[in-house]
Every structure is written in C-alpha cells, then in structure tokens.
C-alpha cells in the first residue's frame, strides 16, 4: 500500500515531467525530441503532445490520486489505531495478542468495511505498525530457579577451559609423511647428529 505522502511525491514528480514536456513543445521541439529528452515512449510523447495542443499546460496537470481510492478515511484509520492500542482483550479476544484475522474483525466492527486478513497487513504498515512475535516460554518456567542455576551450576558445567590451564595440540597421525620423527624412513627421517 502506497502511503499518501509517497503517492503525492510520485504524482508531483510525474506532473513535473509532463510540464517539462510542455516547455519543450513550446520551444518548438517535436515528439521525438521530447521522447529522447525525457526517456518516455513514443505513445506517451504523442499523448502529451495532443493534450498540450488541446488544453495547454493545464491539460498535463495531475488530475487525481494514483491508484485506487482507500476504503478507510483518515478518521476511520485513527479510530482503528486507537482500538488497537487499547489491546485485544478489550475487544473480546481471550489473549492480548493481535493477529491479522483479529485486526480484520475489529476493523469491520468499527467501520463496517470488510478486509481480507491478508490485506490487513498493508493497513498496519500504513499505520507504522510492525510485526512483533512474542518470545515463547514454557508454562512451567520458574525464573527464580533459572537465576539460581545460572549463578551456581552453570559455571561448573560450561566447557570452556579455565584461564590458568594451558591449551594443547597434538598430531593425530604420528607416522605421517610430514612428521619428522626418528622412526620415519626415507629422506624426511631425522638423522642422528654426526
């Protein structure tokens, strides 16, 4: 869903482009020159030219908003947002968790306008709401026991070596050709000192 501000900016930019075409037509430029200068198709330049010839610059003004007219007015959207801020339980739902079907139900109750649950997301984004997923926790969760376990048992269980114990590494194949041990044969063998 295009926000009203973004739609207005886009409409103004398109109108400015048409006005640039009108200036070029007034300077005696042809449709092909307008097409190249503004990067539009031949059909668009042709349409703009005939609108400009019939009605002048006013014929190239933006006449209406882009896209479909919204089904909810700004006042209705504000009312829906206030209802959402109030919480789901105030509207008869068992938990205070908003889901798309629940929001669609509230919109229909408040405004009489039915929306598919999948489309409700566009309305919420237009209201600057974002997806929030609650953290899952076990019903049996005991925060006090968790804090106690983390403080006492966890340090003894974790697998990081203590700071005082040095680390080590060892070869897994002592008799590998790359190993220069005294038992190796061939050119890599360690020769006794002479």
Image: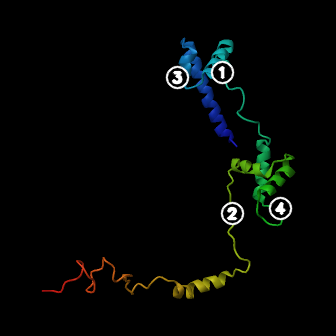
Task: Kindly report the distance in space between the C-alpha atoms of the residues bearing marks 2 and 3.
Answer: 50 Å
Of callouts 4 and 1, the N-terminal one: 1
Task: Kindly report the distance in space between the C-alpha atoms of the residues bearing marks 1 and 3.
Answer: 17 Å
- Residue at 27% x, 86% y: name it: 183
Q: Nearer the viewer, mark 4 or mark 2?
A: 2
Q: Is residue 159 above or below residue 87?
A: below
- Residue at 84% x, 60% y: name it: 91
Q: Cβ–Cβ below 8 Å for labels 4 and 3?
A: no
Task: Kindly report the distance in space between the C-alpha atoms of the residues bearing marks 2 and 1.
Answer: 48 Å
Residue ID for mark 3: 37
Residue ID for mark 4: 90
Q: Nearer the viewer, residue 100 or 180?
A: 180
Element on which disc 2 rests: loop
Q: Nearer the viewer, residue 94 or 156?
A: 156
In the picture, the quarter occupied by the C terminus is bottom left
Q: Cβ–Cβ below 8 Å for labels 2 and 3?
A: no
Left or right, 148 with reference to 104: left
- Residue 133 image label: 2
**Residue 149: x, y in percent?**
60, 86
Label 1: how many Cα within 10 Å (few below 14, some 14–19, many 20+): many
Element on which disc 3 rests: helix
Task: Kindly report the distance in space between the C-alpha atoms of the residues bearing marks 4 and 1.
Answer: 50 Å
How is the structure coloured here?
rainbow
Residue ID for mark 1: 60
In the picture, the quarter occupied by the N terminus is top right
Element on which disc 4 rests: helix
Q: Is residue 104 above or below residue 156?
A: above
Q: Quadrant of residue 148?
A: bottom right
Of callouts 4 and 2, the N-terminal one: 4
């Amino acid at each position: 869903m295009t926000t009203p501000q973004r739609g207005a900016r886009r409409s103004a930019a398109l109108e400015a482009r048409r006005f640039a075409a009108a200036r070029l037509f007034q300077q005696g430029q042809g449709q092909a020159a307008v097409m190249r200068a503004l990067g539009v198709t031949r059909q668009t330049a042709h349409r703009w030219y005939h609108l400009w010839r019939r009605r002048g610059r006013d014929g190239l003004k933006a006449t209406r908003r882009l896209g479909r007219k919204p089904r909810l007015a700004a006042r209705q959207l504000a009312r829906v947002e206030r209802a959402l801020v109030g919480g789901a339980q105030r509207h008869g739902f068992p938990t205070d968790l908003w889901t798309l079907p629940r929001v669609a139900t509230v919109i229909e109750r408040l405004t009489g306008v039915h929306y598919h649950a999948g489309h409700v997301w566009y309305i919420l984004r237009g209201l600057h709401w974002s997806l929030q997923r609650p953290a899952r926790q076990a019903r049996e969760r005991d925060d006090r026991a968790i804090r106690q376990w983390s403080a006492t048992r966890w340090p003894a269980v974790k697998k990081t070596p203590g700071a005082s114990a040095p680390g080590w590494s060892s070869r897994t194949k002592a008799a590998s050709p790359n190993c220069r041990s005294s038992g190796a044969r061939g050119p890599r063998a360690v020769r006794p000192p002479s």
